[in-house]
């Protein structure tokens, strides 16, 4: 399978715990995006990487959130001290380095904070 | 800032009929792209169709076509010959190329149900 993959697909955690999600983009794509989607809403942008550089972060990305893409390939999104409001689907997408290309999404990680 | 508005929370269509899903947008960018994605209950976002702001012809992809009216800032999705497998959530999205507009901005979606 050469699409975007995400791991885990589901995560249940207790409030206050830290969680980490992984995204593996399509191999030749140098742009990687993280989005968050709550029930009944469209995805909202969190952060964007071009290769290993994190070029943009949304104001939705509080200090408890951190994302990395150390070698310009896979990316991780960590949430520290989770809160119930963090419960959502976390989507990763990738695209090649051309303007206005569509983004290809992974299956998402569904986080439930109890 | 960019904004996408989808005013139809839910739509029903009879199998084999055509259906139009509405989308209006707002942007100050001169060059931008408009996208439609399908999200089945499984959760993954599936790219359907793309329209560039300078494209003079409406985009088509199989049974999907995009009715682009630039002056009205609308980008409606038309699905012809609906199939039961078309039942899903549909999102309109846009992306500009100026400034920090690398990400997609999504609307709130339309839940389409195809009736047998």
Image (cartoon, grey):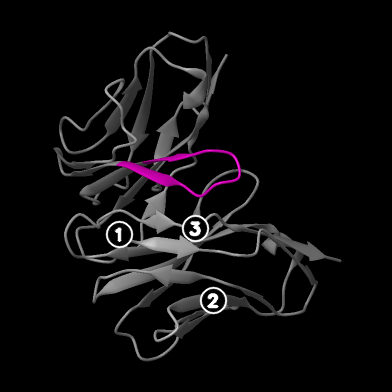
Looking at the picture, tell me which residue is in the foreground, B86 or A17: A17
Tell me the residue at 58%/72% (across/down): B22
Which of the 4 image quadrants contains residue B16?
bottom right
Looking at the picture, tell me which residue is in the foreground, A80 or A4: A80
Task: Please determine whether, in this image, residue A113 is positioned above or below residue B33.
Answer: above
- Disc 2 designates what residue? B76
- Disc 3 designates what residue? B107
- Disc 1 designates what residue? B1
**Which span of residues is magenta-colored?**
A35-46
The answer to whether residue A110 of the structure is visible from this angle is no
Q: Which mark's residue is nearer the viewer, 1 or 2?
A: 1
Find the distance from the CA under tag 3 to the CA under tag 1.
14 Å
Earlier in the chain: of badge 3 and badge 1, it is 1
Residue A77, x across and y down, in percent: 32, 27
Task: Please determine whether, in this image, residue A110 is positioned above or below residue A104.
Answer: above
Earlier in the chain: of badge 2 and badge 3, it is 2
Find the distance from the CA under tag 2 to the CA under tag 3.
12 Å
Chain under disc 3? B
Q: Quadrant of the N terminus of chain A?
A: top left
From the viewer's perspective, tell me whether residue B53 is left or right of residue A69.
right
């Amino acid at each position: 399978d050469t699409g975007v993959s995400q791991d885990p697909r589901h995560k249940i955690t207790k409030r206050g715990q830290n969680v980490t999600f992984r995204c593996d983009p399509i191999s030749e794509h140098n742009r990687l995006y993280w989005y968050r989607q709550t029930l009944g809403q469209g995805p909202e942008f969190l952060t964007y990487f071009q290769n290993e550089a994190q070029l943009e972060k949304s104001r939705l990305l509080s200090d408890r959130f951190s994302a990395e893409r150390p070698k310009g390939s896979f990316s991780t999104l960590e949430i520290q001290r989770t809160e119930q409001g963090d419960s959502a689907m976390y989507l990763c997408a990738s695209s090649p380095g051309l303007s206005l290309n569509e983004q290809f999404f992974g299956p998402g990680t569904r986080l439930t904070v109890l | 800032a960019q904004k996408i508005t989808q005013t139809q929370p839910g739509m029903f269509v009879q199998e084999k009929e055509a259906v139009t899903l509405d989308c209006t947008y707002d942007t100050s960018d001169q060059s931008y792209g408009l996208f439609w994605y399908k999200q089945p209950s499984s959760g993954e976002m599936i790219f359907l169709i793309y329209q560039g702001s300078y494209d003079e012809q409406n985009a088509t992809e199989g049974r999907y076509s995009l009715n682009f009216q630039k002056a009205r800032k609308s980008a409606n999705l038309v699905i012809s010959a609906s199939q039961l497998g078309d039942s899903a959530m549909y999102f309109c999205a846009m992306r500009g190329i100026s400034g920090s507009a690398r990400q997609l901005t999504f609307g709130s979606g339309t839940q389409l149900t195809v009736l047998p």
